[in-house]
Image: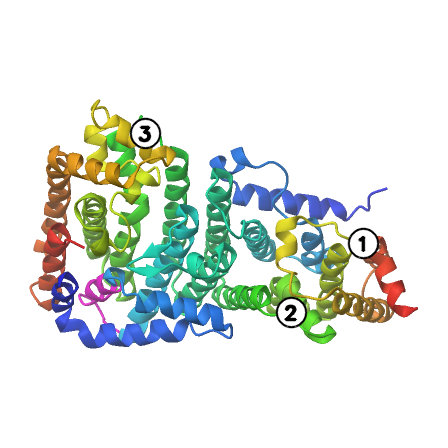
Amino acid sequence: MEKLKLLSLYADFRKDLAYIEKELEKSVDSSSPIIRQASLHLLRAGGKRIRPIFVILASKFGDYSLKQVSKVAVSLELIHMASLVHDDVIDNSDMRRGFETVKSKWDNRIAMYTGDFIFSKALISIGEIEHAGVHRLLAETMLEIVKGEIIQIDYQQQIDQSLRDYLRRIKRKTALLLSSSCELGALVSGADADFVRRMRRFGYFAGMAYQIVDDILDITATDEQLGKPAGSDLMNGHVTLPILYIKEEPDFKPYMLKSFDGSLTEVERMDMLSYIRKSGAIEMAQAISDRYLGKAMAEVEALPDGDAKKALLQIAAFIGKRNY
Amino acid sequence: MERAYMQYVKKYLNEVEQSIYEPTVFRHFSGTMVDEKKAFFLLLPLLNGEAWSSHLQTAAIAVGAVHAAFDVHDRIDVTDATPKSQQLLVLSGDHFSGIYYRLLASLPDFPFIRSLSGTIGLINETKTTMMKKPVIGMDQVIRTIEIIEAGCIIDFYKRYGFTAYLEIVELVLPLLWIGERLGGTVSVQQRVIAQNISMTDMEYAYSKLAQRLEQVLDHASFLSSDLKNDITERIIPFAEHADSNRR
């Protein structure tokens, strides 16, 4: 249902997205049957394609060329996909988006090679755009994202974290790639520096909100909606925003420690989720997300009216209200 | 006594280490992350006196980062990568990949970004196939190992016009790879990738490569005798594998 709502926001750009979807499929074609199967499996598992749509929308304000835009969009979506495949190895996840993960279906090594293969295809796609600024930005973005993940591993199971630590982490984890999606879209369409900066800021604010909502959903959504057990973040040692607000509460702390050491029973998991939902932490986290969304929308408000502006505003609104 | 040109290899290794440095990763791992023999063969044209610009040096460091990325990802445990050291290996490989891209983007060398990325894709496809399907016959073994071991260097040579050196690297890197496995000098994790190759095929492949390398080195008049001797010394530890098949 939610997915349908999101698709309806993309309605004006459906043709362009369909073209990009085909290019995505072509780009992961492989001589290795396993890699081909694994990559298509990932592509067909869906995903919101929020990075490609941000590239499209940001390009719509300049000299729009679908061919150029698709190379950027394909590259960003592939980088995102590759990172998910490797994340599943790190988190030992068996399910993602309701589908078996590559590492679960085959093994860790195959997942590593599949992720690296997809990443190489991302660079082949963007490599066709001979614009030094585009490559410098994407390279820096990728390095920052990995750095964020390295910091996340270093912070795993550390209770002593501040709001600033958390915000820095999600900036690298999610906001940067969304910010770069918008910025790259603007760059390839030859937009002026002011517009490029505005798009970068929009993507960043929307990305921050997106990740906070993602962290909320890990607690409020059902296992079925998530395609994995609710509360997985905490069980993987990740302290997210709602948890930051209640981590010192004596009634909650035992749940957290048991999540970290893997001794949390199924009944305790349900009790823990119920505790967090009733604690007020979700509402506090939602308020932070809303503030970021407000900033994102303010960046777009100043843009010329049209379908692209309308879609950016609608997507920002969707990010705040989504429940999957 | 160490040959004078090895200072270039050491300097290069140092530059690659500096380029891929990431404090958290390096806090957890000791020792070098870059394979000396691959560095040696990547720099073979430079060591042989070919013109070498700063552009070439940067591109070579990028290839070193790719080699380091492959190396760490080959150390991931097949079934359990949850210990922190394994998780960091996954991410360090991704970090090294980002570094190679940043280096090539800084030049910028768009054709090499495309061709090297294509080669990286091919290497991953080849490794995946090799993990799950037997590699049968001497020629297929040689071709497979050549892609995995020498692919990036071949790409570098082709891009920068060092095609005279291609055959050497196509022969010697697979030869060393097979020699190390026949000699049992590699770790359990490194052996996983070779699990679907029979010892007999590897021995035959070794002999064929060794014989051909001998001929190629004999005819490589462009290559200094020091370098020829160096290459020969590198394969001496595994010479018994060639001899056993000639008998």
Residue, x 37% and y 63% (percent of image)? A78
Q: Is residue A277 magenta?
A: no
1 or 2: mark nearer the eye: 2
Q: Point out the stretch of residues depicted in magenta.
A: A52-65
Q: Position of residue A252 (x, y in %)?
A: 22, 28
Of the numbered discs in the image, which one, if any, rests on residue A257? 3
Residue, x 39% and y 76% (percent of image)? A26
Q: Determine crowd level at label 3: few under 14, some 14-19, many 20+ residues with C-alpha closer than 10 A.
A: some
Which amino acid type corresponds to the residue marked 3 in the rendered image?
A: Leu
Question: Mark 3 — on which chain does it sit?
Answer: A
Q: Are marks 3 and 2 on the same chain?
A: no
Colouring convention used in this rendered image of the protein:
rainbow
Q: Name the residue under label 2.
A: B144
Residue, x 51% and y 72% (percent of image)? A32
Task: Say whether residue B74 is left or right of residue B95.
Answer: right
Cβ atoms under marks 1 and 2 closer than 8 Å: no
Residue A289 lies, with reference to residue A263, above or below; the image says below
Q: Determine crowd level at label 1: few under 14, some 14-19, many 20+ residues with C-alpha closer than 10 A.
A: few
Task: Say whether residue A321 is left or right of residue B225.
Answer: left
> Split into 4 quadrants, where in the image is the N terminus of chain A?
bottom left
Say whether disc 1 or disc 2 marks the residue closer to the N-terminus: 2
The kind of secondary structure element at disc 2 is helix
Residue B56 lies, with reference to residue B205, above or below; the image says above
Which amino acid type corresponds to the residue marked 2 in the rendered image?
A: Thr
Q: Name the residue under label 1.
A: B234
Cβ atoms under marks 3 and 1 closer than 8 Å: no
Question: Mark 1 — on which chain does it sit?
Answer: B
Residue, x 56% and y 41% (percent of image)? B18
For residue A268, what is the image quadrant? top left
- From the viewer's side, name the closer residue of A103 and B141: A103
Q: Where is residue B245 in the image (x, y as percent from the top left)?
A: 87, 68
User: Alpha-carbon distance for marks 3 and 1?
Assistant: 53 Å
